Image (cartoon, grey):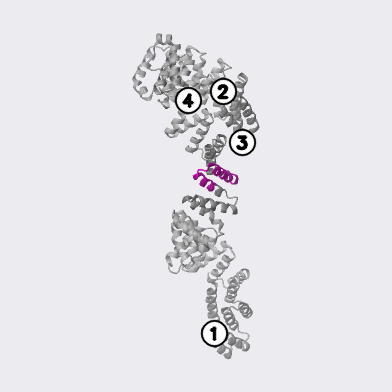
Amino acid sequence: MDTKKLSISLLILLMASSVQYSEAKMTKEAHALYQQACNYEYKSDYNTAISIIQKAIAINGDDAMLYTKIAGLYSDIGSYEEALGAYKKAIKLRPNDAFIYISIGNILQTLGDYENAYNSYMQAQQIYPEYKYNYLNLANIEYFRKNYKKAIEYYNTFLSAYPEHQEASENLANVYYASNQPDKACDIYANVYKKYPTAFKDYANYGMALFDTKQYQAAVEILEKALVDNPENEAVLAKLALSYQNIDENEKAFATYQQVFKLNPKLVVLKFDYANLLGNMGKYDAAIEQYKEYLSAYPDDANAYRNLGLVYKKLDNNELALFNFEKSYSKDSSNVETKKELALCYHKKQDYVNALKYYDFALKTEPDNYELLANKALTLHAMDNYVAAIEIYKELLDKQPNDRIKQNLAAASIAYGYDLYEKQDYGQAILYFEDAINLDKNEASAYFGYAQANEKMGCIETALGSYEKAVSLAPSNPDYVKTLKEFKQKNKDIIAKGGVPEETVPLTTSSAATKSLSDAASLKTTEAQPLSYDELIKKGDEAYKQQKYEDAIDFYTKAVVFKPEDKVTMLKIANTYKLLGNNAKAISFYDKLLTIDANNTDALFNKGLVLANQKNYDEAINCFNSVIKLSPDYPYAYYSIGMAYEQKEDIEKALEYYYLYSGLEKDEKMLNVVNQKIKQLEK
């Protein structure tokens, strides 16, 4: 903004408006001297002009025009105090001359006395409100005083009278930019630049406003122009480097950063973005150095710690990555990306308790994130919390088919099946082995577990077929071969009498399709002739294997009519409803089973799981406590109570039951998991 140029132009206006008024009072001798002074002024001989005006004042000291002339001359040579003194004498002679106040305001503005300059302009405004040019003076002074709202008001008033005034338009844009309104600044800069491309001069601010509005490509073009006149402008170079970086012109960004740091090596605030660039360019060691230098000046910047952690992650240094992610989290616990990275680091470290904690934190922000849910399920799986893992795997498969998730679900179902088998819960183990077989028809361990559980349930023919299937899939497994041989020897009489039915293992998809006609015929037969209890159970099992869960429930329900106290079938019905997500029905059948056998720990425990899934933690805890009363050494009941109290945020009670669980559990892996959970909760 050229305030001196503006001052001179206004003084010319002042003189033009004052000549006629003053000539009437000025003596001929004084007027002649005035004319001589004007001639010397024209020749830029200001000192001679001043001497002549002083002579005129000595002759005619009551003429305001002589004082305004000498004041202007003093101003031209930079003698502002003398100029102000002359203007003050002029204003005494002509107290209502607005232009004298404007001239005084110009000098005060040049001296940086913005408060008195503003008062002088306002005095002129009161005397001559119709003079619109004074709004530019008021706008400029408010801009200097950082009263941006008033500056914008005055610039707009001025531009309503002089819409083509380039300097005022650019200054208005500068005010918008200074008042953090870069979008409005860009609109005005663009308009002025379009109208006056050769006269435009505010390339620096225009370019930075474009950067702030994320118009990086356009910012590059304008900032490059700004550097033509001032190639060592640090602010412009910095914004240009960042603009190159944002449009992936990494080599140009790198070179521009080098220029910036050559000019100012201590410009630490820029080293964060520079480090980001180095990391993206694969210059990891240099990036680490820059992040550390930045953090020494800004130790509370969570983003810097996170990005440093990402570099260490790329270098496969999990410990240092984890350290920096933890630092980032301590500075800003709300960033979901940091939570994800922490979860992945702890997962990689096999610290599953902490991994699960951070997966849960991240899922509060992104509850439908497929990858987060998949990783949480993997963590639960690794912690042997098969039920929770299976539930998530199934939820994910409902959303989107995924072979990896399907394989994990099969593996978790097999593992839980064996877990239930070890607890002698053979009926429920069969259901999970069946699920695994339906997911993966070629998994030998699923058939083997299915065979073992059926053998325990007395289903010899089904067990034989499943053992043979397991051996056919894994003929080199000595345990499978040996077990089949021993099984045949032990049950040779039963096998000899009954033979082995054609289909003794869960149906494959293809066999289910080919049997559709026979199934239909079977249903017709059912209508004509009621099925027996054994036939209903068999039909129910076949429907379950084909994942026709509603049909399975129908057959099982008809079967219990024959044997109302059939606890195994009642448990199958309840568990199938649980599988379908029909919690109300599942609880109803668990309750029916409990009326038959109030001490059935399987029914009590599973009912507790359903209630916990419904977030009815108090009732769930009651069920688990009932299990403990009946079977004090049932470790998972203690664990489940601990989890329920943890969900209720009753950490003291949760710890109490986790401690009880750890005293019963023999599995080293699970003990480590629970001990880590205890340690975390005690922090």
Q: Type of residue at label 1?
A: Asp
Residue at image point 53% right, 50% down: 288
Q: Nearer the viewer, mark 2 or mark 4?
A: 4
In the rendering, which numbered label is found on residue 605? 2
Q: Main secondary structure of the magenta part?
A: helix
Residue type at mark 2? Phe
Sequence-first tag of 2 and 3: 2
Is-magenta flag for residue 301?
A: no
Measure the alpha-carbon separation of dots 3 and 4.
30 Å
Residue under pointer 3: 680
Q: Residue 340 appears at what percent x and percent y?
A: 52, 41
Instruction: Write down the region rendered in magenta.
Output: 306-332
Which residue was labeled with disc 4?
414
Report how far apart the C-alphas of labels 1 and 4 lie in the structure. 104 Å
| CA neighbours of label 3 inside 10 A, class few (<14), some (14 to 19), many (20+) | few
Closest to the camera, between mark 2 and mark 3, is: 3
Q: Position of residue 270 (x, y in %)?
A: 53, 56
Between residue 357 and residue 59, name the one nearer to us.
357
- Tell me if I can see residue 516 in this picture: yes
